[in-house]
Image: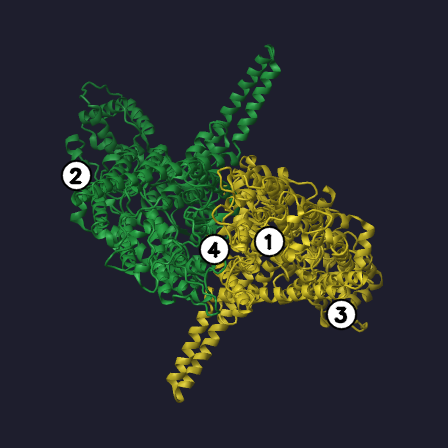
Chain colours: A yellow, B green
Amino acid sequence: MDIMYGRYTQELGVYAKEEAARLRESGQRRSVSDRSRTLDLLEYDKGRCAKCRICTVRCQKFLISRVGEDWIFLILLGLLMALVSWVVDFCIAICLQAQKWMYGGLDSNVFLQYLAWVTYPVVLITFSAGFTQILAPQAVGSGIPEMKTILRGVVLKEYLTFKTFVAKVIGLTCALGSGMPLGKEGPFVHIASLCAALLSKFMSLFGGIYENESRNIEMLAAACAVGVGCCFAAPIGGVLFSIEVTSTFFAVRNYWRGFFAATFSAFIFRVLAVWNRDEETITALFKTRFRLDFPFDLQELPAFAVIGIASGFGGALFVYLNRLIVQFIRKQKAINRFLMKKRLLYPALVTLLISTLTFPPGFGQFMAGKLTQKESLVTLLDNRTWAKQGIAEDFDYIGHSQAWKHPQLNVFVTLVLFIVMKFWMSALATTIPVPCGAFMPVFVIGAAFGRLVGESMAAWFPDGINTDGTIYPIVPGGYAVVGAAALSGAVTHTVSTAVIVFELTGQISHILPVMIAVILANAVAQSLQPSLYDSIIRIKKLPYLPELGWGHHEKYNIRVEDIMVRDVRYITLNCCYRDLHNVLLTGHLKTLALVESAESMILLGSIERAQLQSLLSQQLGRPRRLEYIRERAAAEKKHLSVVSNPGSEDGSQRISTEESSFSPTRPVPQKPLKPALKRPSVVERPTEIPTGPNDNSGIALKNLFCASPDTEEAFLFCSFVCLHILSDSQNLCDLQIAEWEEKQLDEQVNFNNCKIDPAPFQLVERTSLHKTHTIFSLLGLDHAYVTSIGRLIGVVSLKELRKAIEGSVTVKGVKVRPPLASFRDSGTSSSENEATELHKLWDRHKSMSLPREHTPSESDEKSQ
Amino acid sequence: MDIMYGRYTQELGVYAKEEAARLRESGQRRSVSDRSRTLDLLEYDKGRCAKCRICTVRCQKFLISRVGEDWIFLILLGLLMALVSWVVDFCIAICLQAQKWMYGGLDSNVFLQYLAWVTYPVVLITFSAGFTQILAPQAVGSGIPEMKTILRGVVLKEYLTFKTFVAKVIGLTCALGSGMPLGKEGPFVHIASLCAALLSKFMSLFGGIYENESRNIEMLAAACAVGVGCCFAAPIGGVLFSIEVTSTFFAVRNYWRGFFAATFSAFIFRVLAVWNRDEETITALFKTRFRLDFPFDLQELPAFAVIGIASGFGGALFVYLNRLIVQFIRKQKAINRFLMKKRLLYPALVTLLISTLTFPPGFGQFMAGKLTQKESLVTLLDNRTWAKQGIAEDFDYIGHSQAWKHPQLNVFVTLVLFIVMKFWMSALATTIPVPCGAFMPVFVIGAAFGRLVGESMAAWFPDGINTDGTIYPIVPGGYAVVGAAALSGAVTHTVSTAVIVFELTGQISHILPVMIAVILANAVAQSLQPSLYDSIIRIKKLPYLPELGWGHHEKYNIRVEDIMVRDVRYITLNCCYRDLHNVLLTGHLKTLALVESAESMILLGSIERAQLQSLLSQQLGRPRRLEYIRERAAAEKKHLSVVSNPGSEDGSQRISTEESSFSPTRPVPQKPLKPALKRPSVVERPTEIPTGPNDNSGIALKNLFCASPDTEEAFLFCSFVCLHILSDSQNLCDLQIAEWEEKQLDEQVNFNNCKIDPAPFQLVERTSLHKTHTIFSLLGLDHAYVTSIGRLIGVVSLKELRKAIEGSVTVKGVKVRPPLASFRDSGTSSSENEATELHKLWDRHKSMSLPREHTPSESDEKSQ
C-alpha cells in the first residue's frame, strides 16, 4: 500500500470517459437551469421594470461567461499564489526571527542557548511531519515528480485535494521556519497546481468548460510555472524551469498561459513587498551590483568552465547521496523496524543532528551557522572580495558577512567547511518526510562553491587578469552566481537555472559564463545520474518513461519488433465467457485486445479488464444466480418448513464464499458447506487480506461477484441451502450449480453494453525505438499494439519500452523501493493486491496453479 | 508552378521509407568496408610494427565514432554559424560605410549626392534579387515559415541545398548592405538550418547516424536556435524564439541541443568581436547603462501597459499592411503583367522610393534618415533624456544622437515621422523578393515608439513620479526597450522577444514592464491577426495547421463526427482493377483506405495513390499490352509487307494517345486512327499541357501508362496498326483491345508488391476537435481515419480540420495566393496540374463527365 505517495489508480482513458459522461450530465442539468431561468424572465416580464431586470440577468450571464475565460482564471491563480507565497515567506521570516530572538536572549548560558537552538527546529519539523502525516501524506516531499507524472496524463489519487493543499502550505511553512536546509520551490509547484485544481473546481460552478480534462492539464502546466515564478519572482525562469522539470513534450500553445500567470504572480509578489515597505520599488529578490562595463575577462572563462564541470560532479553526487541515504535507512532492518513504530523519530533525529552541528557557538562558528539560507545567499552574492591575497584582515565585514569571519580560520576554510557540511546536511534533510524542496539548499551550496573559486581567483590575480593597462579586479560574486546556477542545474538537469539566476540577481551581465557552466554541469551530471526528480520518481515507482539519454545512437536502430511481446492476450468477437474467464485469469494487462477472430487476428479495439470482469460478473453474478436458484426452488416443488436464524453477516459471508466458488473446474464438490469450517480458510492468510484503508479494495473484490449482499438474498440462499441439507442432496446441488455455471460459461459474450476503445494506438513492426519513445511520451500512452496490415502481432507496454531504454542507461542502485516505505506499510501496492487476490480466489477453486507472471515489484526486488 | 516557394512534394512517410532503405543499403556497404579493413589489418600483421598500425587504426576508429556525437556536430555548427554571422555583419558594415563615404565625399553637389545615395541601394538590391532569382529562388524571404513547415515534417524541395545557402548568404549581405529597413534574423534561421543540413551530409561521410530522419529534425530545431542566437548574441532568447516561431510541440529532450549550440555560437560571435578589437570583453550587443537601484517606479506601469496595448495594435497593423501590399500588387493586372516581364523592376522601384524618402538633405532630415538601423537602435536605447520639459535645446547631442535634432522641429515630431515612415517602409521593403527578415526593422520601430512615450513621460513628470523625496527621473531608454520588445513580440506572436531584449541590452532590470507589455501586445495582436510568419505561410500556401486561438472554448465541444467526411474513398482487399480505376478517378486524396470488404468495412491500412497508380499501370501498362499485341500478331498468322516510315516521335505520340485510350467505357471506337487527325486533339488545349519546368510532370503522366517509348515498341505497334489498316479490320482491332482491357480490369488486384501503411492514424467519433488538433500537430498528420470498432466510418484531413478551426478564427483576406506568384507563372501548382491532367485524359476517353471535386486553389480564388 503506497498511500503516502499516491497510487497509479486510474487510466487516463477511464478518466476521460467519466469526465465526458459528467460533462454531458452537467450539460443537461444546465439546460434545465437555463429553462428555469427563462421562466423566471417571463415572470419578471409580468412585473414592473422588466427591462431593468432582463438587463441585470444579461449582465450576470455575460459576467459568468467571462469568468470562463482563461485569462481570468490565470489572473486569479497568479494573485492567489502570490499571496500564498508572500504569506508563507512572511511566516517563515517570523519563525526564523523568533528562533534568533530566543537564541539571542539566552546568551548568558550556552547550554540553554543550545537547548533553544535545537528544540525549536525539532519541534517545528516534528509538528510538520506529524501534521502532514495525519492530514494528507501526499503532501510530503517536493511534489515536482508527482506533477511530472500527473502532467504525463496519470491520475494520482488525492494529490490535488484541499486537504493536501492545507497540509502542504502549513507543513512547508513549519519546515522552512525551522531553518533546516530545505527549499520552497518544489512544494510551490505542487501548491500552485493544487490551487489551480481547486480554483478550477470552484470556477466550474459558473461554467462548464472547467471540467474539460485536457484544459485542466493545460492549466496545471501553467500552474507549475506560476509556482516557480512566484517563489523566486522569476517569471521567465519559472516558466522554463517548470517546462524542463515537468514536461517531455511541451505545447507552445500553452506558453503564453505560463508567462501570463507567472508574470502576474511575480508582479503581485513583488508589489506586496513594496506595499509592505520592504522595498522602494520592484527589483530582483537577491539584487547584485556587479559592474556593467567589464563584467569578466575572457581569460576567466576556464575558471567558469571548471566551476561547471565540478558542479556537474557535485550535482550527481548529491543525487546519489540522497538516494543512498534513503536506501541505507530502508535496508537496516533493525533501525527500520524501530523507526516504523515511532514515525516522528526520524525527522526529529535528523533535525537534532543538523541543528546541533550548526549551533553557532559550537561547530557552527566554522561554517557561518548562524546565517539563515537567505542571509547566506545574500552574503555569497556580495560584490566585494572577501580575501585579498589571502589576508583575512582585509576582509571588510559588514552586516551578515561577519558570520564568515573566524579569528583562527581564514575564509577559504570556512567556505570549504560550509560547502562540505551543507552538502550532506541538505541531502539528508530532504529525506525527512515533510513538504520540502532541494533547489534552494543546492543553490546556496553552489553559490558558496562559486564564491570559493572566485576568492581563490581573486587571491591568485589580485590585480585582475587583463594586461591592457586598466585594472579590472576579479569579482568573486560573479563566480558565486555562476556556481549557484551550475550546481542547481546539475541536480535538476535543467538549463533554465541560468535564467532563474539572472532574474534573482537582476543582472544578466554574466550570461555567457553562466550558460557555459550550466551546460557543462548538465553534460557531466546527466551522464552520471538521473535528475533529482527522476531519481525520486524511480524511488517512488511512479509510472514514468525514462528519457532517451544523450547521443544514444543505437536507439535509432532498435525496432519495435525487437522489444514487443508477441504472446498477446486477446479476446475474439465471437468468444464465449469461458475464454474471457481464462484470459482474465492468465494476464495482468489493464486492457485486452479485441480481435475479429483467432484466424484473422484483425484488431478491432481494446477493452478494459474491468469491463470484462463486469461482463463476467453479470453473466455469473448474483442476480442471475438468484434467478437460477429461484427457478430451481420452484422446480423442486417442495415446501420449506425448517428455517434457520441467519445473521445477515454470516449469510453474506457464506454467500460470498459460495458465489466465488462458481469456477467450473472445481474438482471437490463434496466440500462441506458449514460456516464453521469455511471461515478459517479466509482467516488463514490475514496478511494477504488488505487492512486499513486498503479494505475497500478487498470489499470491491468481493463485490465483483456479489454486489452488496442483502438480507433477502441471504434468506433465499440459506433457505435453498437448508432445503438441500434437509433433502440430503447437497452433492447433487453443488453439481447442479457447477453445471449451470458451465452452461453459462459456454454462452457467447454479448459486447453490446461494453465500452470498447475502438482506436487503441497501433505501431508497425519496423517503428524504431526512438519513434516509439516519442509517440509514447507525446501521447502519454501506456501500451500500444503492434499490427501488420490490421493483424495483431504483438504489444508493447511502458514496461518493455522502459527495459529497452534502460538496457544501456541503467544506473546502479536506481531501482529502489519508496523511501521510508517500510515506515508506513509492509505489503505490496493495492493494485497488485487486487490482482493477487483475484488470482487466489480463482486458483483456490480451480485447484490448479497456472503459470503466473511475476509482479513488477517482485522482479525489482530480485534485481537489486 | 510554385518553384519560387518550393512544393509540398513528399509525404514524410515516403521519405522515412526511402531513408530506411538507404540506411539499410549503406549498412551493408559499411559491413563490406569493415571486412576489407579487417583484411588490411591481417596484412599489416604480417609486416613490421603491426601493433603500432593496429593502434593507429583503433585511434582512427575511435575518432570517427566520436565524430558521430551530437555535441561535436553542435560545436561545429555553432562555430560555423558564428563565423558566417560575423563575416556577414562585417561585410554589411563595409557596404554601409562605403555608402556613407560616397555620400559624404559628394557633399558639394546635392544632386550627385542624391544619385549616389539612391543608386547604391538600388544596385545592391537589384543584384541581390537577381542573384537569388537565378541561383536559388527558395532563398527569398525570411525562411522561418518554411522552417516551421519543415519541422512539422513536410519535405520542401530544394530548401536545404548548398545552392540555396550561397544564394541566401550573398543575397542577404547585399540586401542588408543597401541600408533598406530589413532584418537578418529570419534568414539566419534559414541559413543555420542550411548549415546543419549540409554539415549533416558532410558528417555522414564518417558515420551512418547522420542519415536518420528524426535526428535530422532534432538537429534542424537546434539549428534554428543557433540562427537566432548568433544573430543577436542571445543564446537563451534565441532558443526560446526559435521554439516559439517554429514549433507547435517542443521536445524538451532537444532543449539542451539548442542551448548548447546557441551558447557556443553566441560566444564565438562575441569573441570574434573581442579579437577584432571592437570590444574590450564580451558584453551585450546593444549595451544599456540604466540605473540598477531604482529602474522604474510602480506608477510608471500604466504607461508600459499602454505601450504594450498600442504595440499590439501596431503589430497587427503591420502584418495586415504587409499582406495588403502583396495582395494589391497581385490584383492590379496591368501592373502585374508589366512587372512580370521585368522581374527586377519591382525591387528597384521599391528601393528607389524608400531611399529617396530617407535622403538626408531631403525628407530624411525629419526622420533621422542618415542613421543606419543599428545606429538608430543605439541612440534610441540611450539612457539620456532627449527632451526635458519639451525644450529641445536641453537635448545633449552626442555622436549619432544629433541626427534626431532638427532646427525647426522638436524631437517628438521627428520621432513620430520616423515611426510612421519606417512603419510602411518596412512593411513594403519586406515584400521585395530578396532574403530578408522583418524582425529588426520592427524592433527599431518599437524602440522609437517606446522612446516617444518615454520622452513624453519625461516631459510630463520632469522630476519623476516618486513622491517620497528622492528624485528618480524617468528613463526614456527603458521605455524604448519595452517598446522594442512589445512591437516585435506582437508582430511575431512571441513572448521570448522579452528575453532577447534583455540579452541584447545586457540588463534585466526592466523585466516586469517588458513582460507586461509583451504579454499585452501578444494578447491584442493574436486576437486581431495571425503572426507575420503564419501570414506568410498562408500566403505561400504551405501545408500548415492553424493554431487554436486564445480561449476558443467551443472547440472543446466540437467532435470529430461533426467535421469528418463520411464519404470515404476506399478500396477493398478483394477488389478488381476496375474499382481501383474508378476510385482513382473520383478522389483527390493522397492516400486511400484499404478495408477488408465493403460490408465489414474493417480498416486494414492505407495505400498511397501513387502505389495504386503503379499497380494499375502494371496491369494495363506497356509490357503487358505489348505482350498481348505480340500474341495477337502471332495469332493473326499473317505476313507484313507494307511498312510505313515511322518517325520515332510520331510513333510515341500515337502510342501514348492510343495507350491512354484503354478506358473500358469508351463509346466511339470508330474514331479514325490517322495521326493527322489525332494530333490536334492534343494541341487543342495548349494551356493545359504544362510547359517549362513543369514538363517533367506532364511526361511523368504520359509515362504512367507508357514508360519511355522506344523505337522497338513504336515499330511493333505501327506494324500492328498497319496490319489492321491493310486488313480493313480496324474497328475490330479497337474492339479487341477494349475487350482485353475490360478483361484486365475485371481481374482481382494483387496487393503483394504494394506498400501498405498498416497503421494509419485512427480517431473515434467522439474525439474532440481540441484533441484532434493536438494529435495532428503532435504527430504531424495529414489525415486520420475515423473508425468505430475497427469499421471505417469517415476521414478527417488537414483541410477539414483547418475549416473547422477557422470557422471562428478566419480573418478577412488571409487566404491569398503567393506574393508575386504571378510574376513567375500564371498556372496552377504542379500537383494540381497533374491531377487535372489525369482527369482530362480519363474524361476525354470515357466521354462522360464525372462529378469532380473542385481543386483547392479554385475554391480559394472564388472565396476571395
Per the image, the residue denoted by label 1 is: A149
* Mark 3 secondary-structure assignment: loop
- Would you call the spot at circle 4 few (<14 residues within 10 Å), some (14-19), or many (20 or more)? many
| Of labels 1 and 2, the one closer to you | 1
Q: Give the numbered dot on residue B684.
A: 2
Q: Looking at the rendering, in which quadrant would you find the N terminus of chain B?
A: top left
Q: Are marks 2 and 3 on the same chain?
A: no
* Mark 1 secondary-structure assignment: helix
| Kind of residue at badge 3 | Lys
Q: Are marks 1 and 2 in contact (CB under 8 Å)?
A: no
* Mark 4 secondary-structure assignment: helix
Q: Give the numbered dot on residue A586.
A: none
Q: Residue furthest top?
A: B47
Q: Nearer the viewer, residue A218 or A298?
A: A298
Residue B824 makes an appearance in the image: no
Q: Are marks 1 and 4 on the same chain?
A: yes
| Kind of residue at badge 2 | Glu
